[in-house]
Image (spheres, helix red, strand yellow):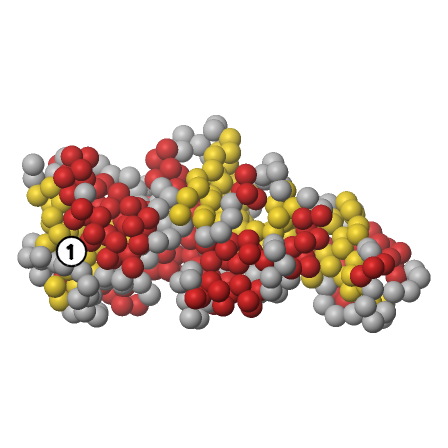
């Protein structure tokens, strides 16, 4: 069998896992690839004395891999934006194929990188950048190629899902976040995870491959989970819902929705049952209907599984000399549509509202009147006298589906009432019908 040379840049959690699995399962992987995949060079910006590289040359200069003429495939696992971009573009200029797990890089610089790869006749593969070890990108680009995909929705950040799962027991956000950091699920700076930025990177890629549009991360709407309370989680459960931090992309005639935010999901839906650090992605196609992809969204060898699947795909191209390959975003470049990302005011959703009202007669009627004036119908309302504190009582309302601009104007009026106190809490709800 022909040998294909692989160089790994970055030996952190995923890089170490990739090296270990490639080494451990070399014979099995060769049998599936139809060629021998040889790690011929590795590099990391810090030493990895805990890994046994054997005869494979190691360097702390990551560009040594890119500049090695013997390397056929560069595996970029350093993370981040600019250095990773420089590394990948340098590899492409040198005629090398690239495999990456870097969702931030693809979401922000993917249009530039894919155009460069197309011109150079090389592949940039990125399965591991979305949902860890779950092969959802391959499913969308290949398995669902016959389908017009109407929407994609998923739990695509395990840290946020772990936090919301633990909060169902009544624990506060700050307490669970600290625990997630101690367990290694959350970074010391958890902003990307809890504020939805990491999920928006992944959703941007999913939407582009699903709908055939350019990557537009800068237009994605993100809202985090730091303001979610155990009170809201408990009352959502009483209404028959779970709160999940979802990425949602929906194709409409006038553009696409691209949004990450806390979402009420019916408890009976499969995605509501996905707990802990696991991920799940729902894809709705016109031919197949709804399909769901579930599994570990992070971890060394789970993510390495997706990295190596990409290496195998690329190695087959190298070994066979084939010019036939799956387009980077699943569509030929000249078939991409320039659909814009819609404003959040144009999306439609049902809404959970928590309004802190003064406990006096007529307040509920005023709230209902304002909602009615804005064309918002109430599906259910919850108010318990036992929850009165300091003359204030929470009013929980679940609305029917309306446009976001309607709810925005209603909330503005509700917050200006002398009978309400503080901001109105708003959580969007989806049924995925």
Label 1: how many Cα within 10 Å (few below 14, some 14–19, many 20+): many
Which residue is depicted at the point 33% across and 65% down? 80
* SS at circle 1: strand
Which residue is depicted at the point 40% across and 47% down? 296
Name of the residue lying farthest toward the right: 361
Question: Is residue 233 left or right of 77 when viewed as pictured?
Answer: right
Residue 220 visible in the shown view = no
Residue 211 falls in image quadrant: top left
Question: Is residue 103 left or right of 343 when viewed as pictured?
Answer: left
Residue 50 visible in the shown view = yes
Which residue is depicted at the point 67% across and 48% down? 237
Question: Is residue 138 left or right of 179 when viewed as pictured?
Answer: left
Which residue is depicted at the point 42% across and 62% down? 183
Q: Position of residue 381 (x, y in %)?
A: 80, 50
Camera-nearest residue between 287 and 353: 353
Q: Quadrant of the N terminus?
A: top left
Q: Eyeballing the image, is 424 above or below 240?
A: below
Q: Eyeballing the image, is 143 above or below 259?
A: above
Q: Position of residue 56 (x, y in %)?
A: 9, 57
Name of the residue lying farthest toward the top: 287
Q: How many marks?
A: 1
Q: Eyeballing the image, is 201 above or below 248?
A: below
Q: Quadrant of the C terminus?
A: top right
Q: Position of residue 227 (x, y in %)?
A: 61, 65
Q: Position of residue 58 (x, y in %)?
A: 12, 63
Q: Eyeballing the image, is 376 above or below 392?
A: above
Residue under pointer 1: 7
């Amino acid at each position: 069998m022909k040998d294909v040379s692989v160089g790994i840049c970055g030996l952190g959690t995923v890089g170490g896992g990739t090296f270990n699995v490639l080494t451990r399962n070399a014979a099995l992987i060769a049998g599936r690839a139809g060629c021998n995949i040889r790690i011929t060079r590795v590099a990391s910006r810090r030493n990895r004395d805990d890994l046994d590289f054997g005869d494979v040359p190691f360097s702390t200069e990551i560009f040594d891999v890119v500049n090695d003429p013997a390397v056929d495939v560069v595996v970029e696992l350093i993370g981040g934006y600019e250095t990773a971009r420089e590394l990948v573009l340098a590899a492409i200029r040198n005629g090398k194929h690239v495999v990456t797990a870097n969702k931030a890089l693809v979401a922000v610089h993917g249009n530039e990188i894919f155009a460069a790869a197309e011109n150079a006749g090389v592949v940039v593969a990125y399965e591991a950048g979305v949902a860890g070890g779950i092969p959802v990108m391959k499913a969308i680009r290949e398995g669902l190629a016959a389908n017009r995909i109407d929407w994609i929705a998923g739990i695509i950040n395990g840290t946020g899902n772990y936090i919301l799962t633990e909060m169902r027991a009544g624990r506060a956000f700050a307490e669970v976040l600290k625990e997630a950091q101690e367990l290694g699920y959350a970074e010391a700076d958890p902003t990307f995870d809890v504020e939805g930025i990491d999920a928006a990177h992944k959703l941007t890629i999913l939407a582009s491959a699903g709908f055939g549009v350019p990557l537009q991360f800068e237009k994605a709407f993100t809202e985090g989970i730091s303001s979610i309370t155990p009170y809201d989680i408990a009352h959502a459960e009483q209404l028959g819902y779970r709160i999940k931090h979802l990425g949602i992309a929906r194709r409409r005639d006038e553009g696409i929705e691209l949004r990450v935010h806390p979402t009420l999901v019916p408890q009976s839906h499969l995605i509501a049952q996905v707990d802990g650090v696991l991920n799940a992605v729902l894809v709705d196609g016109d031919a197949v209907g709804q399909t769901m992809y579930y599994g570990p969204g992070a971890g060394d060898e789970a993510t390495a599984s997706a990295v190596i699947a990409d290496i195998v795909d690329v190695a087959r191209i190298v070994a066979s000399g084939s010019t036939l390959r799956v387009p980077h975003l699943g569509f030929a470049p000249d078939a991409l549509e320039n659909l814009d990302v819609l404003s959040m005011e144009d999306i439609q959703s049902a809404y959970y509202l928590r309004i802190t009202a003064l406990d006096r007669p007529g307040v509920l009627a005023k709230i209902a009147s304002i909602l009615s004036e804005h064309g918002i119908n109430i599906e259910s309302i919850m108010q318990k006298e036992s929850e009165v504190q300091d003359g204030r009582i929470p009013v929980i309302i679940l609305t029917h589906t309306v446009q976001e601009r309607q709810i925005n104007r209603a909330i503005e009026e509700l917050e200006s009432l002398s009978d309400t106190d503080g901001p109105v809490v708003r959580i969007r709800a989806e049924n995925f019908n």
